Image (spheres, rainbow, N blue to C red):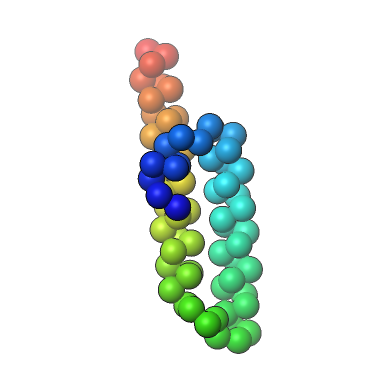
Amino acid sequence: MKQEVIVELSQEELIERLEEEQKQLVKMKLNHAVSPLENPNQLVTFRRNIARLKTEVKRRELEGKNNNK
């Protein structure tokens, strides 16, 4: 998921997408533990997407706090 796409999402969509990505990562980790994934780099991609989503959520929270001062 590209940063441009993440920035355009609403706060609710961001949180929803973050939860979905985290669930998928857990499932993929479990599947990988049982039998190796065809492309283990997918785990890295999911972790990076989660980090991007969390960063955007935190940035928006900080912007909201700065605007309320």
Q: Is residue 61 above or below residue 41?
A: above
Q: Is residue 58 visible?
A: no
Q: Does 65 appear above or below 4?
A: above
In this picture, residue 20 sits left or right of residue 6 = right
**Residue ID at (43%, 22%):** 64
Residue name at image x 61 percent, y 53 percent = 20
Residue 11 visible in the snapshot: yes
Please name whichever residue, 22 or 2, is drawn nearer the observer in this view of the structure.
2
Q: Tell me where residue 49 appears, x and y as whole percent.
A: 45, 55
Residue 31, given in percent of the width and then of the height, sits at 62, 77
- In depth, the one of 38 and 62 nearer the eye is 38
Q: Position of residue 60 (x, y in %)?
A: 43, 31
Q: How many numbered marks have been drawn onto this rendered protein structure?
A: 0
Q: Can you name the residue that lies furthest to the bottom here?
A: 35
Residue 44's place in the image compared with 19, above or below, is: below
> Residue visible at 42% across and 37% down?
7
Q: Quadrant of residue 28?
A: bottom right
- Image position of 39 with respect to 11: above or below: below
- Tell me which residue sits at (37%, 13%) in the image: 69
